[in-house]
Image: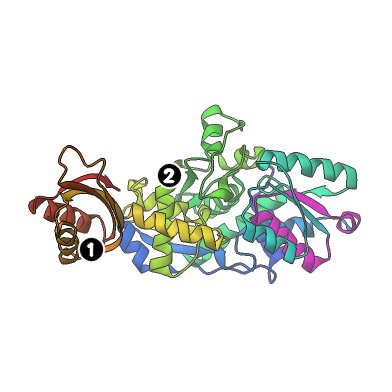
Amino acid sequence: MAPVSFADIAVARERIAGAVLESPCPESIPLSEATGCTVFCKLENLQRTGSFKERGARNALLRLDPDQRRRGVIAASAGNHALGLAYHGGLLGIPVTVCMPEFAPMVKVSTCRRLGARVVAHGKDFAQARERADELAAAQGLAYIHGYDAPDIIAGQGTIGLEIVEQVPDFDAVVVPVGGGGLIAGIALAVKTLRPNVIVIGVEAEGATCFSEALAAGHPVRSVTRATLADGLATPDAGANAFEIARPLIDRIAVVNEDDIALAILRIVELEKLVVEGAGATGLAALLAGKLPELAGKRVVLPFCGGNIDPVILSRVIEKGLVADGRIARFQAIISDRPGGLAGLTKLLAEAGASVQQIEHERAFAGGDVYAVRVLCTVETRGRDHLTDIFARLQREGIRVCDQSP
């Protein structure tokens, strides 16, 4: 018997109704133009705590018996699951303790505390935080609520799939971010039950591929994660229940790199005026990077599963996205060190429409010509085509360009 049934998802929807936002799923004209699909965005980043995790958290909390509600619950989480438990635990009067890795985003840590949860920072990764949570659960009689593998959690996340079917009745595919698998398991079960022909595709970050490793092995395996912008997907293994549910329902998994994710976050900010964290942007990242050519011209739903990104990190991500987009570029040029050499370079850049951010001189390593100087330029452009035109113009004027980035 499967750990979660479609009926469990339907009941979970009734259970959490009125306390969790039924998030909108509008069509995005600009993202459709950018990807070649008709894109619909499921805006889970608009939930009270900024992510879909509220759905499973409230469903699981409401399933506790009265004695366990009094004693409280505990979880290990990098952030969003902790936020969902903290918020709904507060509403329901259930004490919540969360163990977070020491690297957890500060915005999530501080918000968890503000919502009334006891936060225990422990370990360098999720696995070490989980070990501490297990110790505290045993010592203090707390119920451990697994963030992506508890059946009640998976059923709660599956309510997203029910809403998508109602909001976009004729969609062809849904592209879901994948970490431990709870989200895609719930969505796939709901969607495939009601629309068996819909394509379900998971997207992982390059530094967090536990689910595709589990698929290759035929069962969940321990995986080594690396630092990634999609920190919400960086789990050490796929959930056993999530894997059992999702494995027969997923059509395939795609993997995106850090530049792909940064560019997707930038596109969402620019085109949709929304802030979405790295995990939530992976579906769009796969489309923009050309990883899903089979979806060209189709009606595709993208769950924007979270919006909790540290403002400092967001500024860095936007800059990284601009570099990936070719709109910030750095290059070296060899110019004359005689009077007017630098002025000539900046004049050519201005005429080409580039905005100079920074220029640095380097005489000692400019080569054998003592009348030459190596100049490191950082410029803003309109994109890669514009950058190519700028380099061509400089070379036509006799300025040698080297070490181009990106």
Task: Report the quarter where the N terminus lies.
Answer: top right
Q: Please, is residue 254 above or below residue 215 in the view?
A: below
Q: Quadrant of residue 97?
A: bottom right
Residue 334 located within the stretch drawn in magenta: no
Q: Secondary structure at mark 2?
A: loop
Residue type at mark 1 is: Ala
Q: Nearer the viewer, mark 1 or mark 2?
A: 1
Q: Which mark is residue 257?
A: 2
Q: Is residue 343 left or right of residue 124?
A: left
- The residue indicated by pointer 1 is 354
Residue type at mark 2 is: Asn
Out of 380 and 194, give the one closest to the viewer: 380
**Mark 2 crowdedness (10 Å alpha carbons): few <14, some 14-19, many ≥20:** some
Residue at point 49%, 49% (across, down): 196
Q: Secondary structure at mark 1?
A: loop
Residue occupying the far right of the picture: 67
Residue range corresponding to the magenta coloring: 67-94
